[in-house]
Amino acid sequence: MATLNIANTSNGSTYSGAWTNQNVTSVITFSDATSGINAGSLEWTATNSNWYAISNTSTSTYTDTWSGDRNTTNAGYKICDNAGNCTPKLFTLKIAYAIIYL
């Protein structure tokens, strides 16, 4: 089974899912000691229902940037090993660029 880890940062600091008005950068690391990583299987989602392929050739790491207004608890990535076992990981993503005046 593939191991998948995601380290998110926003504006140079660790991002934990609170509201931000900055882009969020995800550094995704993955490995599989048994069958190896299928680099072409990396996918992303903002909903956990629709998954989209990422053009990736690395078998160990990928860096991605989230932008645009978002409010989801289902953002994430998925990677598969060469045996076909897939590992998804989801996180909360809240980005709002607009300033609301009341």
Image (cartoon, rainbow, N blue to C red):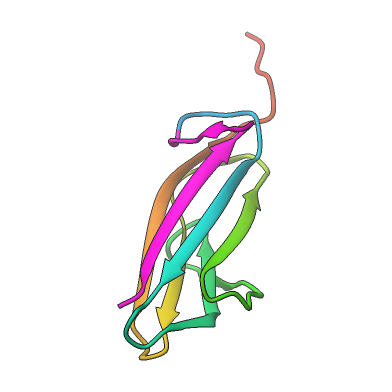
Residue name at image x 69 percent, y 26 percent: 98
Q: Is residue 86 shown in magenta?
A: no
Query: Residue at (68%, 19%) from the top-left corner?
Result: 99
Q: Is residue 49 above or below residue 81?
A: above
Q: Which range of residues does the magenta coloring cover?
A: 1-17
Farthest front residue?
A: 33
Q: Is 80 drawn above or below residue 52 in the view shown?
A: below
Q: Is residue 5 left or right of residue 98?
A: left
Residue 15, position in %: x, y? Answer: 49, 35
Find residue 80 and report its image quarter.
Answer: bottom left
- Percent x, y for residue 67? 67, 45
Q: Is residue 79 left or right of residue 101?
A: left
Q: Quadrant of residue 16?
A: top left
Farthest top residue? 102
Looking at the image, which residue is at 66% across and 11% down? 101
Quarter that holds the N terminus: bottom left
> Up-down: is 27 above or below 96?
below
Callout count: 0
Quadrant where the C terminus sits is top right
* Left or right side of 64 for 44: left
Quick check: 63 left or right of 30? right
Front-lying residue, 52 or 30: 30
**Among all residues in the image, which is located at the extreme bottom?**
83
